[in-house]
Image (tube, rainbow, N blue to C red):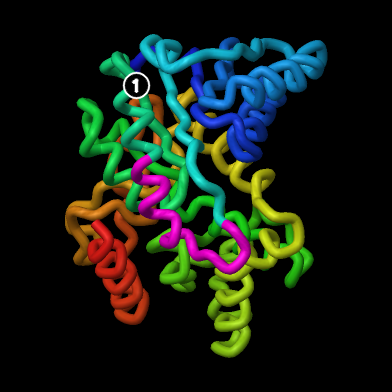
Amino acid sequence: MTNQKLKNKIVVIGAGAVGSTIAYSLMIKNLTSDITLVDVNKEREQGEVMDISDALSFSETSTINAGDYDSVKDADIIILTAGAAQKDGESRLDLITKNKNIVNSIFKEIKEIKKSAIILVVSNPVDILTYLVQEIVDLPHNQVFGTGTALDSARLRSNLSKRFNIDSHQIEGFVLGEHGDSEFIAWSTVSIGGKPITEMLNKEEMTKICDEVKNEVYEIIKEKGATYYGIGMTVVDIVEALMLDQNKILPVTYRLNDYNGVSDVCLGSTAVVGSSGIIRPWLIELNQEEKEKFQESAKKIKEYL
């Protein structure tokens, strides 16, 4: 554990379905006393704050406020969710131009950021936008990172939990690479109750599960138009590691330096997360097949960078 002062004020930029769900989830978890929601659509921002405020009597510590870009100056954690949402038939990479412009415009409006602040990027494509934000702001790279493949890894645990009828908390393992179509399950990292998953599934079953995990987002968007509950709790899990200085190993996107042969790109990879952000990379030696998939995913992201 570090001795750095624990975080307090959280600003969520973007009051859409994802941003408001994150604010609501943070309030329920009692992780902070100060949550501020910021959006260019002030009517939507105010409506979400009023709606969440109705639940405050069931919370122990939180307050929820409407703010503006000036609210960021004393924020300990800034959660970036603003941007165009992924639509049916779109990949996350299809959002690059629109969301790059939105992110640039937001940070032009933000005049001041605390030197100790953490920026958590949620907007898609998260790997590319994390790299972009790192280039824009004057903060160490370890204090600017994205949700990466944390949600995909949660989907993997849920999938295996249903398949084997085992509590998902007993399942370990990671989806790595792009938070998108080139992601892959690092099966060499997956185990249930200490038993390697490779002893329990054949190749055909693994391929089927990988497709299910990767394509779940498209199914959800087709059925209901957007995903927000899963990413909401994924963000809360990451924020909890920051707020409580947990030094938790999480598959987030951050600037890599020779992680399984990949450097100078942000990609879903395991890291130790604590109060100062990325404490250190948590290098998992992938097998040759996984390493090649990881490097191919990095190559794809670098083409867009």
Q: Position of residue 239 (x, y in %)?
A: 51, 31
Q: Which of the 4 quarters of the picture holds residue 286?
A: bottom left
Q: Answer yes or no: is residue 251 visible.
A: no
Q: Residue tagged by mark 1?
A: 109
Q: Nearer the viewer, residue 303 or 280?
A: 303
Q: Nearer the viewer, residue 100 or 246?
A: 100
The question of residue 93 being in magenta is answered with yes
Q: Is residue 305 above or below residue 229?
A: below
Q: What secondary structure is found at the residue carrying circle 1?
A: helix
Amino acid type for the residue under numbered disc 1: Glu
Q: Is residue 129 left or right of residue 138?
A: right
Q: Is residue 108 above or below residue 89?
A: above
**Magenta highlight: main SS:** helix
Residue at 24% x, 65% y: name it. 303
Q: Which residues are magenta?
A: 87-101
The quadrant of the rendering that contains the N terminus is top left
The question of residue 33 being in magenta is answered with no
Counting other residues with Cα less than 10 Å from the Cα at mark 1, is it few (<14), some (14-19), or many (20 or more)? few
Q: Position of residue 55 (x, y in %)?
A: 80, 18
Q: Which of the 4 quarters of the picture holds residue 103?
A: top left
Q: Is residue 243 above or below residue 293?
A: above
Residue at 46% x, 63% y: name it. 180
Residue at 60% x, 55% y: name it. 154
> What is the total number of numbered labels drawn onto the structure image?
1
Q: Position of residue 80 (x, y in %)?
A: 45, 34
Q: Is residue 64 above or below residue 192?
A: above
Q: Answer yes or no: is residue 201 visible.
A: yes
Residue at 54% x, 79% y: name it. 198
Q: Nearer the viewer, residue 245 or 104?
A: 104
Q: Nearer the viewer, residue 155 or 16?
A: 16
Q: Position of residue 72 (x, y in %)?
A: 41, 16
